[in-house]
């Protein structure tokens, strides 16, 4: 079987991480040949081990209500015809739209719904705007392109996205398949704690020790991973850190990720007088080692289609405290692997963080629970779906 994954670029993100992990795993399977196509040379991951499987094929589609379309897919069309895939699997809306302007009905097409694509939302006369009209127009064109290529099969990553896709279209099937991680990568190796204490780490500096501690009866090491964009809501995490301080708990936090609001969050930490409790490390490759250095994973996103970072934290043995972001409801079991909280209430977050810290039963539960979302079992489910659709 030949499988082609198409995604616009390889930025740091859940969709991109899944594609890379999946393709690496598929290369180990007999009778499967898989490739990745990206549109731009924007790569934030170490791809050295599968570089030969990734092709940059500049492609774009710009639609216009006046039908002055700009369609640049000739190189992508040529690539598809040359590779002759049995399956074309697209990720994120840009890849969804651009790829469907190619014509290749011999493949089975899959549309991976990593979030609730606003372009597919049903139109409403009560909320007409240029953006809504543009989205409506793109949806009409996209569904015509689906039909031209023999349809599509939507893959929803959570019950929330599944419900959304079913509510905005009824032409094509929708399958719920939670995204997955490479669990082995995030499992803490035996003796890792001792290696930190003895200063023998080679790939990661001992980051939490760069932050000061005090004589509080409790010192917590928190971690948060995500792009600095509005929905990730890191300023709320600063309020939680401040609340913990007011309770006499010293909480230091590693922030992993980058984005347009990073400076704003840093400035807010300065205003609150807690900058010395925060370490902003930007995008990092070996996320797992930062997780192993921490006590509790705290996630403050207001919207989360699923939340692979939650699973990564669990696999690393961390309790998780998260705001309800809809899709992450599929992952959280209150009191077992952490807590999912409905309201942005610093006091409640602080209380739950203190409660789950050093909870050995929860730590063990999480390391086992994460195995349900391992990339190997995911691969088998996906291949079954591919074959069933043939």
Image (cartoon, helix red, strand yellow):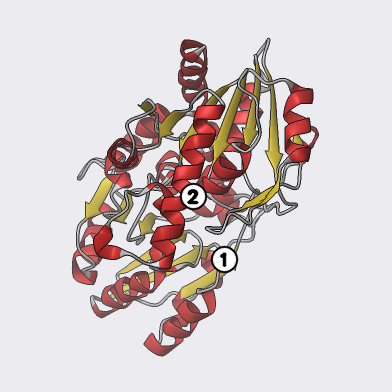
Give the residue at the far front of this rendering. 66
Secondary structure under badge 1? Answer: loop
Determine the residue positioned at 57% across, 48% down.
94
The reply to whether the C-beta atoms of the residues labelled 1 and 2 are less than 8 Å apart is no
**Where in the figure is residue 123, as x and y percent of width and height?**
32, 53
Question: Which mark is drawn over residue 258?
Answer: 1
**Where in the figure is residue 169, as x and y percent of width and height?**
34, 36
Q: Residues within 10 Å of mark 1 (few under 14, many from 20)?
A: some
Q: Is residue 110 above or below residue 30?
A: below
Determine the residue positioned at 20% across, 45% down.
334
Residue denoted by label 2: 138
Q: Is residue 129 above or below residue 36?
A: below
Q: Nearer the viewer, residue 256 or 229?
A: 229
Q: Nearer the viewer, residue 153 or 145?
A: 145
Q: Is residue 23 above or below residue 338?
A: above
The answer to whether residue 182 is visible is no
Q: Nearer the viewer, residue 163 or 74?
A: 74
**Where in the figure is residue 192, as x and y percent of width and height?**
55, 45
Closer to us: mark 1 or mark 2? Answer: 2
Determine the residue positioned at 32% across, 46% down.
328
Determine the residue positioned at 52% across, 40% down.
186
**Where in the figure is residue 307, as x and y percent of width and height?**
40, 47
């Amino acid at each position: 079987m030949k499988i082609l994954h198409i995604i616009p670029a390889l930025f740091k993100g859940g969709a991109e991480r899944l594609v890379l992990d999946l393709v690496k795993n598929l290369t180990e399977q007999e009778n499967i040949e898989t490739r990745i196509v990206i549109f731009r040379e924007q790569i934030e991951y170490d791809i050295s081990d599968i570089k030969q499987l990734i092709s940059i094929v500049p492609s774009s589609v710009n639609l216009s209500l006046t039908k002055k379309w700009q369609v640049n897919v000739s190189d992508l069309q040529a690539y598809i015809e040359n590779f002759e895939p049995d399956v074309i699997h697209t990720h994120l809306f840009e890849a969804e739209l651009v790829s469907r302007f190619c014509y290749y009905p011999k493949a089975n097409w899959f549309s991976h719904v990593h979030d609730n694509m606003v372009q597919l939302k049903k139109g409403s006369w009560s909320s007409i705007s240029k953006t809504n009209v543009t989205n409506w127009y793109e949806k009409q064109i996209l569904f015509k392109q689906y039909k031209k290529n023999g349809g599509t099969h939507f893959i929803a990553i959570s019950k929330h996205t599944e419900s959304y896709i079913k509510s905005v279209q009824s032409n094509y099937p929708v399958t719920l398949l939670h995204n997955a991680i490479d669990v082995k990568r995030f499992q803490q190796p035996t003796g890792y704690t001792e290696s930190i204490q003895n200063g023998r780490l080679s790939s990661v500096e001992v980051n939490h020790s760069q932050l000061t501690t005090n004589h509080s009866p409790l010192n917590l090491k928190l971690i948060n991973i995500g792009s600095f964009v509005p929905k990730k809501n890191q300023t709320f995490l600063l309020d939680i850190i401040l609340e913990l301080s007011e309770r006499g708990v010293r909480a230091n936090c590693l922030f992993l990720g980058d984005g347009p609001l990073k400076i704003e969050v840093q400035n807010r930490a300065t205003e609150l007088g807690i900058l010395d409790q925060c370490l902003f490390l930007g995008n990092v490759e070996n996320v797992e080692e930062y997780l192993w250095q921490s006590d509790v994973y705290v996630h403050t996103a207001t919207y989360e289609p699923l939340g692979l970072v939650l699973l990564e934290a669990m696999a690393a043995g961390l309790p998780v405290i998260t705001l309800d972001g809809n899709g992450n409801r599929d992952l959280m079991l209150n009191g077992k692997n952490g807590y999912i909280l409905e309201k942005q209430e610093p006091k409640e977050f602080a209380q739950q963080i203190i409660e789950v810290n050093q909870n050995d039963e929860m730590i063990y539960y999480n390391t086992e629970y994460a195995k349900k979302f391992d990339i190997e079992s995911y691969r088998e489910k996906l291949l079954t779906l591919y074959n069933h659709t043939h």
